Image (cartoon, rainbow, N blue to C red):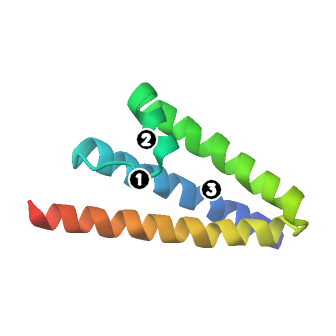
Amino acid sequence: MSDIGYALIVFALLNLLDWITTHYGLTKLNMVELNPIARRIYERFGTVGLFSWKQVGVGFIAFTTYLVAGVDAESTLWLYNAVFAFVVLWNSIQIFLATRRR
């Protein structure tokens, strides 16, 4: 497998973990989505809308960044992998703290 293949696998897994942790926090712990656009989509369309938003939005952002910034696709994916790793870590910490308070 090429290096970009690994970047794509990590990208997909991190996005799935982002959705799972966000979904859990919103539905089980009554947390609030911090992204105002995603929050409105969730309020209107629920978890299916949020999942769709994350998939379409992330793909669009990664693709346009690649086109505008002029960086190669693999570097763009690894940059977004770092961002989503932080998001998943943040979500996980918030879930941990919320469950400790209960």
Q: Are marks 1 and 2 in contact (CB under 8 Å)?
A: yes
- Identify the residue at image location x=19%, y=62%: 98
Residue 90 vertical position relative to residue 29 in the rendered view, above or below: below
The residue carrying mark 1 is 34
Helix, strand or loop at label 2? It is helix
At label 3, which amino acid type do we have? Answer: Ala
Q: Which mark is residue 81?
A: none
Q: CA distance from mark 1 to mark 3?
A: 21 Å
Q: Quadrant of residue 43?
A: top left
- Looking at the image, can residue 1 be seen? no
**Which of the two discs, 1 and 3, sits closer to the camera?**
1
Q: Residues within 10 Å of mark 3 (few under 14, many from 20)?
A: some
- Mark nearest the camera among 2 and 3 is 2
Q: Which residue is mark 3?
A: 12
Q: Earlier in the sequence, mark 2 or mark 3?
A: 3
Residue identifier under label 2: 39
**What x and y, as percent, mark residue 71?**
87, 69
Going 77% across and 64% down the picture, which residue do you hit? 5
Amino acid type for the residue under numbered disc 1: Leu
Residue 12 x %, y %: 62, 56
Q: In the picture, which quadrant includes the C terminus?
A: bottom left
What is the x, y in percent for residue 83? 59, 68
Q: Secondary structure at mark 3?
A: helix
Q: Considering only order in the chain, which callout, 3 or 1, is on the residue closer to the N terminus? A: 3
Question: Hey, what amino acid is under mark 2?
Answer: Arg
